Every structure is written in C-alpha cells, then in structure tokens.
Amino acid sequence: MRKSALERAAAAALLLAVAVVAGLAIAWRSPSQPQGGGVSDPEKWDKVFSTAKPRYRTEPNDFLARSLRRLADEKWLAPGTAVDLAAGDGRNALLLAAGGWKTTAVDISKVGLDKARASAAAKSLTLDCREADLYAFDYGTAQWDLLSVIYFNPALSIVDRLKAAVKQGGVIVIEGQGSEHDGGGPPKETLFKPGELLQTFADWRVLAYEDGRFESDWNLGPKTHVVRLLARKLGK
C-alpha cells in the first residue's frame, strides 16, 4: 500500500528529529570535558584504587607539601578551606587535613574515597569526601582558600570555574604532565603546553613555577616532563 504524501512527510520529519537528537548525543560532551582518557569513568578508577600494589605514588605530592610549607613560612596564607580535585585515595587531601585545613576531597571513585575516609578515621582527621564527576561538581564562587589540582590535567578545561571558586588571596596548586610526556596518562590534548599555566594565571601572582623533567607521581621510574604551579589570586 502506497503511503500518502502526509504520511511520507510525517515519517521524514520523525527521521530528521531522530537524527538531530542522535547528533547532539554524539557531539555533546560538555565543552569542558576532553574526549578519551577515562577521566569520567568510575569503574576504571575503582579498579585503579583497588589494586593491591599501586603503580602511583601513595605518599603526598612533594610539590604540594613544599607549597604548604612556603605558604606558612612566608605568611602568604593561613590554613582555611581547601578542596582537592581528583583526590583518589586521599593522599593529598589527608596532607591538607593534617595541616589544619578544612578539606573537601572530590573524586569519581567510590573505592578511592572509601580508602580516604578509612585513612582519615585511622589518623583522627576530619575529611569531607564527595563522590562526584569533577566536571559537574559545584565548586561555588569565592569558596576555597586553597584548591589543589594534582595530576588532573583536564581541569584546565574548567579553569574559569576553578579560578572563580578561589577566594581573593587564596591559592591554587597544580602539578601535571607536560607536553613532552609520552608515558601514558591523561588525554594527549590536555598535556600542559609550554607556558600554558603561566598564561592561564597571568592575572594571578605566580609564587612558584617549575617546568622540567621529574618523576611523575603517576609514572613512577624514569623522569618525564612535569609542570608545576603555585599561584595566588590577587586581592587582600
């Protein structure tokens, strides 16, 4: 039976609507979310933090520890509110909490955060753990005195939100793989380019910047390209 012109038009309109929706579904990754790398894959990270013999550094990040000492020694900033992005099993969030910071640990891995909570309890530390996609988490406005981004390179895609979330006089601490790193890890397009962090934080006071070959917390062994930044938001 031949379809009427009206039926054919209705069918064509339906197909067009389906195609549009499908196209949006394929194209829509929050513009802030890089493709690849499994950065928003909770199952992947649950497996990483369930490993009996971790392949990542389990001690607190050295640059973060040095930054905290400098902030205290030079009286740049007293302990206040802190948020640690991609906190994992809490190695850096626990360092902050132990230093007197009111610390929030954010990660997509329930396994990692459960380990962080257990470690905090064992050390009698207070740690607010939030299981959330780092792209969707509400960081607020002028909410944190310190924001740490240790080995979460894709955070630069939401850097405007992160900068807005830091109070005037507060700081951000970043360490991640640089553009010459080739040992696996974050999506290649998120590797820090030469001078990229300096340019991104040109409106802040850069207290420390390191760009060179160091051992990466997530690529233990041979040295690789690592970039580090400690910057203070201009204000009081």
Image (cartoon, grey):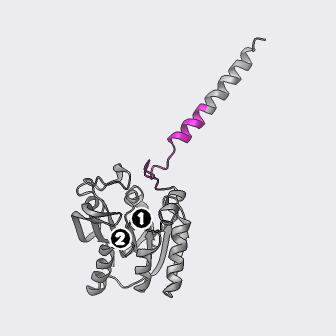
| Magenta run includes residue 33 | yes
- Compared across the picture, whether 132 is left or right of 6 comes to left
Residue 106 versus residue 5 in the image, above or below:
below
Q: At numbered mark 2, what does the secondary structure look like: helix, strand or loop?
A: strand
Residue 91 versus residue 220 in the image, above or below:
below
Q: Nearer the viewer, residue 175 or 183?
A: 183
Of the 4 image quadrants, the one containing the N terminus is top right
- Tell me the CA gap for discs 2 and 1: 9 Å
Residue that numbered label 1 is attached to: 162
Badge 1: residue crowd in 10 Å (few <14, some 14–19, many ≥20): many
Check if mark 2's residue and mark 1's residue have beta carbons within 8 Å.
Answer: yes
Q: Which residue corresponds to the image point at 37% horizontal and 67% vertical from the top-left?
A: 150
Residue 125 versus residue 223 in the image, above or below:
below
Residue farthest along the left direction in this orientation: 212
Q: At numbered mark 1, what does the secondary structure look like: helix, strand or loop?
A: helix
Of the 4 image quadrants, the one containing the C terminus is bottom left
Mark yes or no: residue 145 visible. no
Residue farthest along the top direction in this orientation: 2
Mark yes or no: residue 111 visible. yes
Where's residue 89, x and y in %?
47, 71
Q: Nearer the viewer, residue 63 or 160?
A: 63
Q: What span is colored magenta in the figure?
A: 19-39
Task: Identify residue type, mark 1.
Answer: Leu
Residue 140 versus residue 73 in the image, above or below:
above
For marks 2 and 1, the one nearer the N-term is 1
| Magenta run includes residue 124 | no
Q: Which residue corresponds to the image point at 35% horizontal and 70% vertical from the top-left?
A: 172
Q: Which residue corresponds to the image point at 52% horizontal and 74% vertical from the top-left?
A: 115
Residue that numbered label 2 is attached to: 172
Where's residue 12, x and y in %?
65, 23
Q: Nearer the viewer, residue 35 or 32?
A: 35
